[in-house]
Amino acid sequence: MRSPHGQGQERDGRQMAAGIEQIGHGLTRITTEAERLLNETTLRLAITGLSRSGKTVFITSLIANLLALGRGRDTLPALTRHMAEQGRRIEAVRLEPAGTQALDWFDAADKLRDLAGASPHWPPRTSDLASTALTLTVERGGTWRGLLPSRRIRLELLDYPGEWLLDLPLLDQDFSQWSAATLALLRRPPRSAVAGEFMAFLASLPPEAPAEEAVARRGYLLYRALLSEARDRLGLRWLQPGRFLVPGPKGESPLMWFFPCPGESAPAPGSLRDLLARRFEAYRDDMRQSYFDPWFARFDRQVVLVDALGALCAGEGAFEDTREAVAQIARAYDARSRSRWLGLPLLRRVAFVASKVDHVPAAQRPAFESLFRGMVAVPDGRMVTHRAVSALRCTEEAPPAAPGGAPVVQGVPLGENRRRPFRPGHIPAAPPPPGDAFWQRPYFELPVFRPPLIDPDGREGLPHIGMDELITWLLEDAL
């Protein structure tokens, strides 16, 4: 039997060993954290787009082309040139595993299978938040080469519905302000063409109608149907609230059962307007607490995709409405970029991107980019850029149909097997003013071309126009 003294020595030994082990773990954590701070940079890029702008394909292309670049394929030549000018190169790119994140995982491999399958098709539109991350291993340059290990750039990507982005301006409005602005739009073309049933419903309400759930829900359903028709039939984009069109994982809930209602004075307690105003405030607060504050405010880079060409071809109403939506978004981001925390800007870079530039012949692309720049009406600068890109090129340049004729592109329409030419017509270098003769031309929808033949694993990257220059601009300050 061991003496009490021996037992005490053994206990002290175990405690000392445990203490040494804890110190070792602590030193390991400190060393790991110090190495991370020295060699790893995290960039957070949020990507969204107005309806039908090709956001899902944009993110898939970004991931596939960076991964292929890491395997030695020169899929992003502008980025390769930039790195060579800095005396460095990207040694490897790795897609991070899903891990334990709370958000949906953006599955780029699944999207590639949609694009490259036996019956190629475009992936479905985004309906919720999703994220993923890439790690870029970057060779050090200059005097540090060989002395320090390669740097790591962790690129976090957030994918979210563009419809939600349109709710940013609601954070600075109350119910009366939003109602007045929305009803003014509904009384004018083009919205007046689809607003008849909803406006008749409003006109049937007494000035101080009592709060009745059935009335509130009917008004909400009529207003939501109006928004859907304005988007799908008229091609409009400035449609609020965004979750009425894309409700997300929470689905439809009672805080969404409101609609714009006239009235300048404060609503009387127990009235329908009072109920609608309280729901508007609850919706606005829920968007702030559930989405904007915990997710969007964390990201220091932003891409906003816009189908500017589709809006131009859809006519004056669709173009001006898309222009207003982009202008409102730009103002919201400009306000955020002026907010500072510890003296640093919260939003470092914003790229407004016109998609589907592969539908535009090369000779017309400078005019298209100029048109888009005028559409956004925010000057280029250190923090803002305007680009026209095609994340997945589906067309090729084709000779004019007749000598001296207008240039065209050609692609295979979805569901067909033969190439067909397409010409977007005259593209002005600046937004035509309201009532301009330009708007007298026939309206038409852009054709939907079949995705090109691509490797289902994306090992060679995806063919694109301008993605390399855009990605270089987004990342260059960290590379």
Image (cartoon, rainbow, N blue to C red):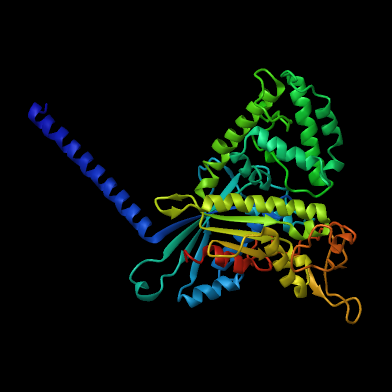
Quadrant occupied by the N terminus: top left
Q: Quadrant of residue 386?
A: bottom right
Q: In which quarter of the image is residue 196?
A: top right
In the figure, is residue 27 to the left or right of 323? left
Residue 78 visible, this angle: yes
In the rendered picture of this protein, how many numbered marks are placed on residues?
Answer: 0
Q: Which of 474 and 169 is in front in this view?
A: 169
User: Looking at the image, which residue is at 69% across and 41% down?
Assistant: 242
Q: Which of 315 and 186 is in front in this view?
A: 186
In the figure, is residue 192 to the left or right of 379? right
The residue sitting at the front extreme is 265
Residue 457 visible, this angle: no
Q: Does residue 355 lie above or below 429 as drawn? A: above
The residue sitting at the bottom extreme is 403
Residue 459 screen position, x and y as percent? 63, 64
In the figure, is residue 407 to the left or right of 302? right
Residue 456 screen position, x and y as percent? 69, 60
Residue 7 screen position, x and y as percent? 13, 30
Residue 264 screen position, x and y as percent? 69, 30
User: Looking at the image, which residue is at 84% across and 41% down?
Assistant: 192
Q: Does residue 365 lie above or below 155 as drawn? A: below
User: Looking at the image, which residue is at 47% across and 63% down?
Assistant: 478
User: Looking at the image, which residue is at 79% across and 26% down?
Assistant: 218
Q: Does residue 161 lie above or below 195 as drawn? A: below
